[in-house]
Image: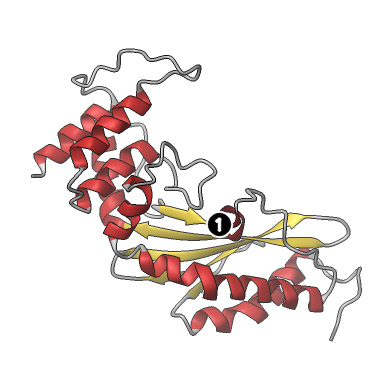
Amino acid sequence: MIMNIWELSKIQAKELTIKYLEDFFLLKGYKRKKTQSSYFNFDRKDKTGFDSVAIGYLESYPGSKISYSVLKRIDKVELIKDKIFEISEPEKVPNKRSLTVAFSQATVDGIFTNNFMPEMLNETDVEVSCGIVKDFMLKIGFPMLEKFNDIKELDKEINGDNFWTTDWQMPFNLGGDFDIKRIVIAWLAENPNFEEIVDKTYDIMSQNSDGTYYHYDRSDLSLRIPYTVHYLNTLR
């Protein structure tokens, strides 16, 4: 039954989104994480940690718009980060759902807004929006998640020839703490240029917002990057 403009509440939008997406994700090994809110996830455990697709809704008038993100947790990255934080930033509480990679159709396309999806006023609109999600996942989302099961591929993206200075407004981000995670990822990937990556990271951390430099004490283990390097050296 096609609903009219006044019948599609946020709860109904959620129910219809589940109707058109749940079987699609189940076939890929994802299970819906049930919530009481209109936001929900499709999760799949894998050999590296877990993959997840987070579904939500943007307020729009007179309807609403789907907002979605694709997420990956790589346990070995996050667990090392947590060990580093135990000493360097003990106020940060470990989170079993902390993320290593996050992206969306918006970040991949370089538009950096989730407000690009069509407005949904009825069931047909929801079906169209879910079709967009499916198309992105088949063409981009699932292949990227699979690619980054290999830590060396993730390392190539951020620490390779196109060396990232930040993950802000890039095709994907590392879910926070980019400076630490990039070094951990390079170490886990056994990047032959590891020391150079560390030096470049120090240079980035030593630069003020106006482009001038200050003295960043690489021997001060109270600072996050020196302690990260120190901790990784203890694991050798």
Q: In this view, does 82 lie to the left or right of 195?
A: right
The residue located at (20%, 42%) in the rendering is 194
Say which quarter of the image contains residue 105: bottom right
Of 191 and 114, nearer the camera is 191
Q: Is residue 8 above or below residue 217?
A: below
- Above or below for 170 versus 68: above
Identify the residue at horizontal 84%, vertical 86% (top origin): 1
Which residue extends farthest front?
161
Give the side of residue 44 with respect to residue 186, left or right: right
Q: In which quarter of the image is residue 215?
A: top left
Q: Badge 1 local density, few (<14 within 10 Å), some, or many (20+)?
A: some
Local secondary structure at mark 1: helix
Q: Which residue is drawn at 42% across and 66% down?
A: 145
In the displayed structure, does residue 225 sit left or right of residue 116?
left
Would you say 68 lies left or right of 124 here?
A: left
Q: Where is residue 147 in the image (x, y as percent from the top left)?
A: 37, 66
Residue under numbered circle 1:
108
